[in-house]
Amino acid sequence: MKTLFDETRINGIKLKNRLIRSATHEGLADKSGHLTDEVLKVYQDLAEGGVGLIITGVAYITEDSKYLHGMMGFYDDSLIPEYRKMTDVAHDNDCPIIIQLAYAAKDGEMWTADAPSNEEIKAIVEPFGESALRAKRAGFDGVQIHAGHRYFLSQLLSPSKNGRQDEYGGSLENRSRLIIEIYDEIRRRAGEDFGVFIKLNSTDLDGDDEVFTSCRYLCKQLADRGIDGIEISGGYGPFMPGRAFPYKESVLRDDAVLIAKDVQVPVILVGLNRTPAVMEEILGTTDIEYFAISRPLIHQPDLPNLWREQASQHT
């Protein structure tokens, strides 16, 4: 019988449990995206707290693509030594760590699906690959492509938000093209033995059923290419209003269950994962393999250790 505290592996990455820290924007980097002591302390606390895998807060991959205050930068090889401190503290606590990469803005202006030219879109593929190789050199176990929460990559997938008439708009194949190009470039640069994950929306929480259709199609395409893990999220995050869920916890489970049936790739469920008993029921009755948590770990980074201790007392 599967439990939350099984030891598992994803493309050689050893996880001591099925609990994952979902990418969370800390807002603690300096104005140039450099890490601060406060940022590093966050990751030390998480690693010591017993989570099975850390996904970092979002990092911007070109110097002109920052879009959040205090966002971490990952745009230059000169940043590698400071990120090595982050990966070292995680690995010293037997915790793998991957970095979330994003491109959503240029010179402070958020991109919508229709805003950039074809040439501007093509120009962001290479920086994703360069950042993945940089991540490998900095000691990360992998990267996660941020293609959720209605940012640029997420908007491209949606026919209601993407009105482009070029190779990145129109058909489902075209709307998926950029993310697949990014994945292929990352894999080419970083190699088959490096973890590559994605986070994407199964719903925008606005009644657009095509979002799930697009998500499902893209997951199949990426699974066929060998992606290592898929995190299913929604909206600007899974806490936005607009869609009624039949559950108070683990609210996106129905979407994730269908995708997990489609692909032979670990599916990670995020969105109000709160109670070990609920997560273990999902684990035991579906093909979902992992559970990502954000807000509870902000308040209590040692929650995984606490849950492990509670589980051991009941066995």
Image (cartoon, rainbow, N blue to C red):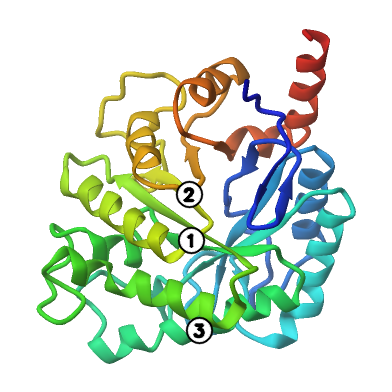
The type of residue carrying mark 1 is: Ile
Report x, y in % for residue 84: 81, 71
Q: Earlier in the sequence, mark 1 or mark 3?
A: 3
Query: Which residue occupies 65% across, 24% down?
Result: 3
Badge 2 element: loop
Q: Earlier in the sequence, mark 2 or mark 1?
A: 1
User: From the viewer's perspective, is the residue at label 2 or at label 3 nearer?
Assistant: 2
Query: Which residue occupies 76% across, 16% down?
Result: 311
Q: How far apart are the alpha carbons under marks 2 and 3?
A: 26 Å
Badge 1 element: loop
Q: Is residue 122 above or below residue 203?
A: below
Q: How far apart are the alpha carbons under marks 1 and 3?
A: 19 Å
Badge 3 element: helix
The type of residue carrying mark 3 is: Pro
Q: How far apart are the alpha carbons under marks 2 and 1?
A: 7 Å
42 relative position to 69: left or right? right
| Location of residue 170 by image quarter | bottom left
| Location of residue 306 by image quarter | top right
Report x, y in % for residue 48: 84, 42
Query: Which residue occupies 80% across, 38% down?
Result: 49
Residue 86 visible = yes
257 relative position to 31: left or right? left
Q: Which residue is mark 3?
A: 127
Residue 110 visible = no
Report x, y in % for residue 100: 56, 62
Q: Which residue is mark 2?
A: 265
Q: Which quadrant holds the C terminus? A: top right
Q: Which residue is mark 1?
A: 227
211 relative position to 136: left or right? left
Is the residue under label 1 in contact with that under label 2 (CB below 8 Å)?
Answer: yes
User: Which residue in the rendered view is the most extreme toward the bottom?
Assistant: 119
